[in-house]
Image (cartoon, grey):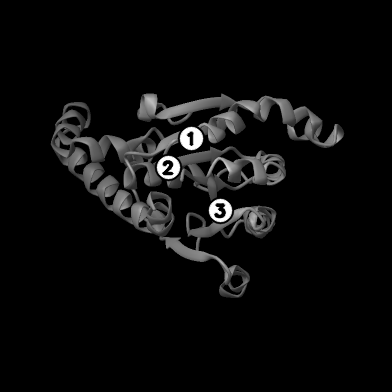
Amino acid sequence: MPRILLVAQDKGGSGKTVLVRALAECLPSAHLIEIEANRRLVELEDRVSFFPVRAERGEINRTGGAAARAEFDGPLNAIAAAQGPVIVDVGANTAGSLLPLIGEAQARYARRGVEFGLLVVLTSEPGALANAPVLLDLAKPFTAARFAVENQIEGPVDAKALKAFKDVTLTRLERLSLDERANDLLQKGGLHFIGEDLTAAEDSLADRFGFAEAGRIVEDLTRFRAKAMQAAGPAARWLEG
């Protein structure tokens, strides 16, 4: 039975793609579907099927969602054809349109043995915090498991707000202070770079930035990778079955 984990947050800048990368590190056998305006998961190469989203939110709202329906045919078809675990990176301003379409097709997916889970990323930013429960409610009718990761990139989420997520598996990604270059590499796929071959990664960084800074970068990325994979762990274990 193929399991599909949708990773969503309609507010940009929440760290969603970092969690997608952490999931990919947790489960190297998983295929990925990326639904974004531009391809970002380039370091994962042929593990990723990329589907560009072109319709803007204003046009989607103006047409009652019609502008988005046809452009989701590609990822919806890819999900239906899945043979194993799949991680779906749902781009910003996209989940609110995509999740209802999956819900409408739930019975048809079930006949193919497809099972869905949802992971939402929440931060202390008001827009992201407000959007997370909306997405969880949209997905509740068709998901077998729901997860939320509190990304403390902008500081901890208020404890009272977190009580609204009692019906989901909630984990936390603590804010870490990273070397500037380590943070830059993180945004360009540094989790995979570090995880693939640590010795080669350090040698490459030393050639570019010097021995001392390379050590700091490797230490920061290794520490962040472990924390991100820990936060993604419950969802990854569900996905693996």
Where residue 99 appears, x then y in whole percent? 67, 45
SS at mark 1? loop
Q: Residue furthest front?
A: 111
Disc nearer the start of the sequence (3/2): 2
Report the side of 9 relative to 2 (left or right).
right
Percent x, y of residue 162: 58, 70
Give the image location of residue 101, x and y in percent. Answer: 70, 40
* Lower sequence index among marks 3 and 1: 1
Corner quadrant of residue 133: bottom right
Mark sitting on residue 85: 2
Q: Is residue 14 above or below residue 48?
A: below
Are there few (<14), some (14-19), or many (20+) residues within 10 Å of tag 2?
Answer: many
Quarter location, residue 64: top right
Which secondary structure, mark 2?
Answer: loop
Count the marks: 3
From the viewer's perspective, is 167 left or right of 224? Answer: right
Q: CA distance from mark 3 to mark 2?
A: 18 Å
Name the residue rendered at 68%, 41% in the picture: 105
Residue 38 visible, this angle: no
**Mark 1 neighbour density, 10 Å: few (under 14) some (14–19) many (20 or more):** some
Q: Nearer the viewer, mark 3 or mark 1?
A: 1
Please name the amino acid that badge 3 sits on. Val
The image's mark for residue 82 is 1
The answer to whether 202 appears left or right of 77 in the picture is: left
Drawn side of residue 63 relative to residue 75, left or right:
right
Give 101 or 109, whichever is nearer the viewer.
109
Q: Could you say whether the residue bearing mark 3 is in a helix, strand or loop?
A: strand
Residue shown at 32%/51% (left/top)?
A: 224
Q: In the rendered image of this protein, does residue 141 appear above or below residue 4?
A: below
Q: Residue at x 39, y 53 (%)?
A: 241
Name the residue beneath numbered marker 3: 120
